[in-house]
Image: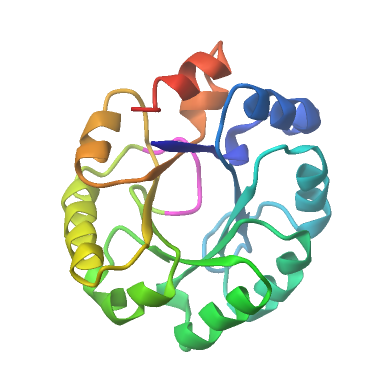
Amino acid sequence: MLVAPSILSADFGTLNDEIIAICSAGCDLVHVDVMDGHFVPNLTIGPVVVNAVAKVATKPLDIHLMVENNTFFVDLFAPIKPKYISFHIEEEKHPHRLIQKIRDYGISPAIVLNPHTSPSSIEYLLEDLDMVLLMSVNPGFGGQKFIPSVLEKASKLKEMIEKKNANTLIEVDGGVNNKNILMLRDAGVDIVVAGNYVFGSHNYKVAIDSLKV
């Protein structure tokens, strides 16, 4: 299991140190939640802060866009060269075009599904994607309770990926901890995003290691 701590739960007063700490503790990706105050009610960070994160991070960035006007935000963040940029299918009218735009930047494209959105909605996009991010909470805020139905959803998505012989990874974001990590692994999940569980712990390495099952 790959682990991507979400910096939404970090102490922004010492963000530089927090990024260095999670990278030193063995995280695989640094998850960055970009919210515009429209698609979700929260407003987070822009490219100036994310660029600063990229300069100190020794692990690749995983940028999750929770925004309206995805194309604008892809163009805004692409120069930072993250490993992944993911966008919500609920907010995109032309997903094929946006997937290709992200790939043309040399970045791995990913699509995000809200808890109520069926994996069948992206069945014909799977072979074009490098990752699908399943939300196991409603997007917008950290610290929410895990929605168990994502386990069945992940299993169905895994079946779809295998049927198409695609190389698409499955990531889950929201309420991930050492209590549900084995169930997520058994459901076919490849990457977990963990915010409060990592940054709320006394030892980042112990927390991250406990998710690497």
Q: Farthest residue in the front direction? A: 165
Q: Residue at x 73, y 38 (%)?
A: 57
Can you give x and y, in whole percent of width and height, for residue 195 in the image? 51, 34
Q: Is residue 143 magenta?
A: yes
| Whether residue 80 is situated above or below residue 70 in the rendered picture | above
Q: Magenta stretch mostly in which secondary structure?
A: loop
Q: Residue at x 72, y 67 (%)?
A: 78
Question: Which residue range is magenta in the image?
Answer: 139-144
91 lies left or right of 47: left
Can you give x and y, in whole percent of width and height, for residue 95 in the image? 46, 83
| Whether residue 129 is situated above or below residue 3 in the rendered picture | below
Q: Taking the image as drawn, is residue 118 in sight?
A: no
Query: Which quadrant of the structure image shows residue 55?
Result: top right
Depth order, front residue of 93/60: 60
41 lies left or right of 80: left
Colour scheme: rainbow
| Whether residue 125 is situated above or below residue 132 in the rendered picture | below
Q: Quadrant of the C terminus?
A: top left
Can you give x and y, in whole percent of width and height, for residue 66 in the image? 54, 63
Q: Is residue 46 magenta?
A: no
Q: Residue at x 71, y 32 (%)?
A: 19
Depth order, front residue of 19/70: 19
Q: Quadrant of the N terminus?
A: top left
Q: Exactly how many numbered labels are in the figure?
A: 0
Q: Taking the image as drawn, is residue 176 in sight?
A: yes
Q: Residue at x 62, y 66 (%)?
A: 107
200 lies left or right of 152: right
Q: Farthest residue in the top direction? A: 202
Depth order, front residue of 40/6: 6
